Each structure stands twice: as structure tokens, then as C-alpha cells.
Amino acid sequence: MRIFSKLDEMIGYVEELKEMLPEDEEDYLQDLVSRRACEKTIEVAIDSLIDASAMVVSAEKFGLPASEEGIFDILVRRKVISRDLGEILKDLKGFRNILIHRYAHVADDIVYYNLSKYLDDFYLFKSIIESYLEIEK
């Protein structure tokens, strides 16, 4: 199933990010190449998360979302994910948009905080989606 491949792709990006993300914020702030690599890697990980979410909505025929954020609302409404996880996923999507558009030249310390904060949520999302799909078979 393509959804499983997309989830594996997402986790692959997260694993890459964990390897390249400096453990120390100061090291992160001092290394432009590392910062940009981490930003791009989290961006594509979030893109994969959004794609996997959209695939679940489509495969389960849950309807058409009004927006990308609406995908998460549908998953919450259909009890695929919790409301709390839905909010986290919306935050991730917003973070991705900030990175892509460089709104007000986002502060690198905030980026580092978010990179460190959200990584476990990708694993949680994958686990929940895989469990849901296994139950639905």
C-alpha cells in the first residue's frame, strides 16, 4: 500500500534529521550548512506526513478537505487521530510554511527548538496510522 511507503519515507527523513541535527543548540546556530540541511529535511518530512494524511483520507473516502489543514480535521473527526495529535500536525504544517516562506526570517533558535520538539510526533503518527490501517483491513 502506498500509504505505508509514504510513512516509511517520512521516517527516513526524520532519521536523517536526527543524525544531522547537532545535540547542542549553540553548534546548530554556528553552522549555516547544518541549519539549512535540517530545515530542508524537516520540510520534506512534513510534506510526507501531509501526503500520507491525504492518502488515508482519500483511501477511506472520508471526503474532500477544504484545505491541507482540513485533512487533519477530517482524521480527527473520523477518530483516526486524537484532537491533540491533530493540533500538533497543524503546528507542523504551519512550521513548514514558515520555513518555506521564511516569514520574517524566522529565528534559528526557534527552528532548533521545533526540530528538537516534534521528532517523536512523526513516530507516533506513523504508529497510529499503521494501526488504523491494519484494523480497517
Image (tube, rainbow, N blue to C red):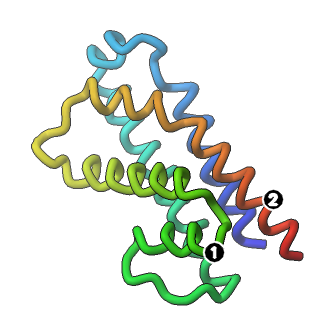
- The residue tagged 2 is 131
Q: Is residue 77 left or right of residue 8?
A: left
The N terminus: image quadrant: bottom right
**Viewer-proximal residue among 81 and 118:** 81
100 versus 133 height, above or below: above
Furthest-left residue in view? 104
72 versus 15 height, above or below: below
Q: Is residue 40 left or right of residue 45?
A: left
Relative image position of residue 131 (x, y in whole percent): 81, 59
**Viewer-proximal residue among 8 and 114:** 114
Crowding near pointer 2: few (<14 within 10 Å), some, many (20+)?
few
Residue in the picture at 63% in, 75% down: 78
- The residue tagged 1 is 78
Image disc number at residue 11: none
Q: Nearer the viewer, mark 2 or mark 1?
A: 1
Residue in the picture at 35% in, 11% down: 27
Q: Amino acid at mark 1?
A: Arg
Helix, strand or loop at label 1? It is loop
Relative image position of residue 3 (x, y in whole percent): 70, 68
Relative image position of residue 5 (x, y in whole percent): 72, 62
Helix, strand or loop at label 2? It is helix
Q: Amino acid at mark 2?
A: Ser
The C terminus: image quadrant: bottom right
Crowding near pointer 1: few (<14 within 10 Å), some, many (20+)?
few
Q: Are marks 2 and 1 in contact (CB under 8 Å)?
A: no
Quarter occupied by residue 31: top left
76 versus 113 height, above or below: below
